[in-house]
Image (cartoon, rainbow, N blue to C red):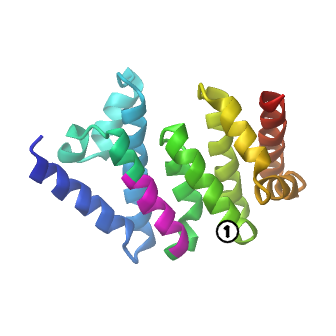
Amino acid sequence: MKRAYRERAMNRLYAELKSADFDTRENALFQLALMLRRSQNARPSADWTDYDSEHLSRDLLRIRLSPADQERIARHLAQMMTTCADSRASVFWALSEVSAPVGFATVMSATAEFGDQLNDEAAFQACRALLKWLETDEAATILARNLLAGSDHLPMLRRWSRSTEFRLAKSADAVIKLAQRLSE
């Protein structure tokens, strides 16, 4: 794909991420998550190939995201945390599709900054992303140590693990236990 077309398609998607319209933003986050998921899988599974083509434009389908693209996307998503509080859960969900080295730092930073301001769904999605990376990344031990070493992170996770929202409590507890196990 020619660079100009690629930039135009991505700039359209970034503009939709900044939209004041909630549904437009959420659709852009969904498309971005599909693109990120495709970039993590060397070969798209048969199940997702048709799904991608149903929800991504032809231009977006042709784009293969590089590690540098993922870093740029993570920066855009981190900015969204500040400007679009009502989309934080979806932002964490989309971030979970970024590679662990990029996404983990972004999620940790966002939870440190917005932890008490996150609703249950956003906190759950943050925990879900952390758990995914701790379970699958080769550098999970390093990630776990970083998680436990952060002075803001462990107390926040412990608070979430005592939540009355069952999914959040279970997910936060799983993150804590896995991080402790990996760091031993």
Q: Position of residue 31 (x, y in %)?
A: 37, 50
Position above or below: 23 against 176: below
One can see residue 167 in this view: no
Residue 79 included in the magenta stretch of the image: yes
Please name the residue shown 47% across and 68% down the image: 79
Task: Where is residue 88? Give x, y as percent.
Answer: 57, 64
| Residue 134: in magenta span | no
Name the residue located 71 percent from the left edge and 72 percent from the top edge.
117
**Which quadrant does the N terminus fall into?**
top left
Report whether residue 95 is seen.
yes
Q: Is residue 26 left or right of residue 175?
A: left
The C terminus is located in which quarter?
top right
Quarter of the image for residue 7 reads bottom left
Magenta segment, which residues? 72-82
- Of residue 100 and residue 47, the one placed in the foreground of this image is 100
Q: Is residue 100 left or right of residue 178?
A: left
Vertical arrangement, residue 147 with respect to residue 162, above or below: above
Disc 1 marks a residue whose amino acid type is Phe
Q: Is residue 110 above or below residue 37?
A: below
Determine which residue is flagged by label 1.
114
Rate crowding at label 1 as few (under 14), some (14 to 19) or many (20 or more) other CA atoms within 10 Å.
some
Badge count: 1
